[in-house]
């Protein structure tokens, strides 16, 4: 079972992006002789014009069975399994090429497309593993939503998007409210303090549940 995972390059004033930091470590965790899952990772630009183009090329090159895109969300302290990809780009800050859309459609499709990952099973498995997670119905309207939308448009198999907290190995994230207006279901009485290895562990669970679900289909 070959799974393509994508993360994003840094954007805004930050020098790292938790999505890529977590994604790039995943092959070391899952790609071994005993694993039935092959993980291929790729980094996407935070650019509206080129991210879908690169994603299309990655899909063609890798020929995956499952596609999982990952992004970071500065206002969230839970893993968010995104449910809905909206047909809209509305950026609070410019992308890394200086482009800042305001309410523009991403394609000619319907207003909303649903994930093709087993979201409920993923959330349950993450929580059982001590990795707090929720289903989310708001992927924002920045690059995360745009790539989520592109993944569903460009790939026919199981595909979806995961938001991880914007963990930093040094300092704090400067991005967050500029790109993600989602606040509900993210504030807990006992806030989980994440590390990058824990984010990678969470993505490992996501991959295993997605692979098992695909194998049953």
Image: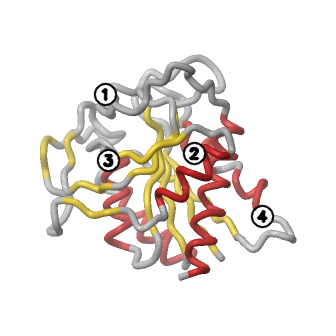
Q: Nearer the viewer, mark 4 or mark 3?
A: 3
Do callouts 3 and 1 mark residues in contact (Cβ within 8 Å)? Answer: no
Q: Is mark 1 on a helix, strand or loop?
A: loop
The location of residue 64, given as percent across then percent down, is 56, 75
Q: Which of marks 3 and 1 is in front?
A: 3
N-terminal-most mark, 3 or 2? 2
Q: What element carries label 4?
A: loop
Q: Residue 20 carries which label?
A: 2
Instruction: Indicate the quadrant where residue 198 lies.
Output: top right
Residue visible at 31% across and 55% down? Answer: 84
Instruction: Indicate the quadrant where residue 111 lies.
Output: bottom left
Q: Which mark is residue 137?
A: 3
Residue visible at 56% across and 51% down? Answer: 124
N-terminal-most mark, 3 or 1? 3
What is the spatial separation of the Cα atoms under label 2 and label 1, in whole angstroms? 19 Å
The location of residue 210, given as percent across then percent down, is 57, 66
Task: Tell me if residue 10 comes above or below residue 81 in the rendering.
Answer: above
What is the spatial separation of the Cα atoms under label 2 and label 4, in whole angstroms? 17 Å
Q: Mark 4 points at which residue?
A: 31
Q: Is mark 2 on a helix, strand or loop?
A: helix
Of the 4 image quadrants, the one containing the N terminus is bottom right
Q: Name the residue under label 1.
A: 178
The location of residue 197, given as percent across then percent down, is 71, 39
């Amino acid at each position: 079972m070959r799974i393509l995972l994508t993360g994003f390059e840094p954007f805004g004033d930050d020098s790292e992006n938790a999505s890529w930091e977590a994604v790039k470590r995943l092959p070391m965790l899952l790609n071994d002789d005993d694993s039935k899952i092959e993980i291929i990772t790729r980094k996407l630009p935070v650019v509206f014009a080129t991210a879908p183009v690169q994603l299309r090329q990655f899909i063609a090159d890798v020929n995956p069975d499952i596609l999982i895109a990952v992004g970071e969300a500065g206002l969230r302290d839970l893993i968010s399994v995104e449910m809905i990809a909206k047909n809209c780009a509305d950026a609070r800050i410019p992308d890394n090429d200086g482009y800042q859309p305001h309410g523009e459609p991403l394609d000619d499709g319907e207003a909303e497309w649903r994930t093709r990952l087993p979201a409920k099973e993923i959330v349950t498995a993450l929580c059982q593993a001590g990795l707090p997670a929720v289903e989310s119905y708001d992927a924002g309207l920045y690059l995360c939503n745009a790539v989520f939308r592109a993944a569903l448009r460009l790939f026919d198999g199981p595909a979806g998007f995961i938001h991880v907290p914007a963990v930093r190995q040094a300092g704090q994230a400067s991005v967050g409210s500029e790109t993600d207006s989602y606040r509900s279901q993210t504030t807990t009485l006992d806030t989980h303090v994440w590390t990058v290895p824990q984010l990678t562990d969470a993505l490992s669970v996501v991959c295993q549940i997605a692979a098992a679900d695909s194998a049953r289909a």
